[in-house]
Image (cartoon, rainbow, N blue to C red):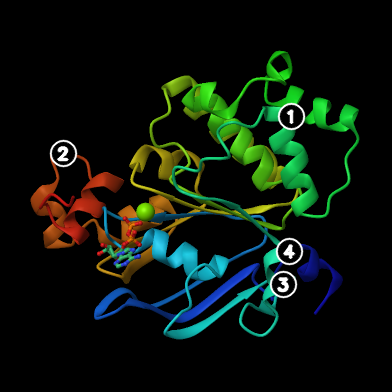
Amino acid sequence: MTEKSKQAGVGATPILDVRDLVVRYGQRTAVDNVSLEIRRGEIFGLLGPNGAGKTSTLSAIEGLVKPSGGTVSVDGIDIQRDPLAAKARLGVQLQASSFQSELAIEQIVRLYAGLYGVSMTKQQIADRIRTIGLDGELGKRFKSLSGGQQQRLSLLIAVIHEPVLLLLDEPTAGLDPQSRRQLWDRIENLRTAGGSILLTTHSMEEAEAVCDRVAIIDHGKLLTVDTPAGLIAQHRNDPRVTKVARGKITLEDVFIGLTGSEIRD
Ligand SMILES: Nc1ncnc2c1ncn2[C@@H]1O[C@H](COP(=O)(O)OP(=O)(O)O)[C@@H](O)[C@H]1O
Ligand SMILES: [Mg+2]
């Protein structure tokens, strides 16, 4: 490989390599042979209706559920063979994440820094908390924070050990437009600082605004992967898509066309 192609990431190991992943809960197959690659520096969106298998896919990558089949490598490290080294490279923000609700913000940050083996002084902790605009609230309890504040704190903790890959499960669910915009900016900044991000969402707007590439998943199966514009170009003449379109084909038309119109709970 030439120095130039190395810099461009051409031929480099993907930051995340998921091959033929299968996750089963008893008889139910939640993830059905999913393969995907996330490139270094990429913001990748996993888009799918409720119950599609998004959280189960992330849980398998995080090592929270044991896959029934397939392999997952983070930064070239197989998560089954070397789970500790793989997990040390991951930052994780769970869906509807909630911390020990009685602890104060400062205590929570200190606790998680300790768990991740990151040593931080009191001043460094205060500085970090300032970056999420909570410096006046060091002693406040997690449960008394607003949704947006809780979200910012849980993102701060997810990246406290400077992971190379950040996994965010519906990070903007329930946020107001201001907080959502701010989170998009934070995600963009993490990428600029050298991170790669895999997020799940069912917001087309979010997928188009922040994701370089998007995969649509449903019933545990990966239906298609491309840039948001590429997905529209790829599926614009699909009769399932043209049937649901109300004018110019949008990403939402592609999504509804491929996943169907019935409501999922
Ligand atoms: N712990 C579990 N036990 C049994 N079934 C589960 C469990 N978690 C998820 N499922 C089922 O697996 C499927 C995929 O769920 P999930 O991965 O949470 O989807 P999504 O995050 O896309 O909404 C759904 O049918 C869901 O009901
Ligand atoms: Mg989910």
| Residue topped by disc 1 | 106
Q: Quadrant of residue 31?
A: bottom left
Badge 2 crowding class, 10 Å Cα cut-off, few under 14, some 14 to 19, many 20 or more, is: few
Residue at left 73%, top 37%? 109
Residue at left 23%, top 45%? 249
Front disc: 4 or 1: 1
| Residue 110 location (% of width, % of height) | 77, 39
Front disc: 1 or 2: 1
Q: Considering only vertical position in the picture, is 209 above or below 201?
A: above
Residue at left 35%, top 41%? 203
Q: Considering only vertical position in the picture, is 91 above or below 252?
A: below
Q: Tag 1 or tag 3, which sits nearer the N-term?
A: 3
| Residue topped by disc 2 | 247
Ligand 2's quadrant? bottom left
Q: Amino acid at mark 3?
A: Leu
Q: Say whether residue 260 is visible.
A: yes
Front disc: 2 or 4: 4
Q: For the residues marked 4 and 3, what is the alpha-carbon distance in whole angstroms?
A: 6 Å
Q: Do labels 4 and 3 touch, CB within 8 Å?
A: yes
Q: Quadrant of residue 8?
A: bottom right
Q: Tag 1 or tag 4, which sits nearer the N-term?
A: 4
Q: Considering only vertical position in the picture, is 159 above or below 181?
A: below
| Residue topped by disc 3 | 84
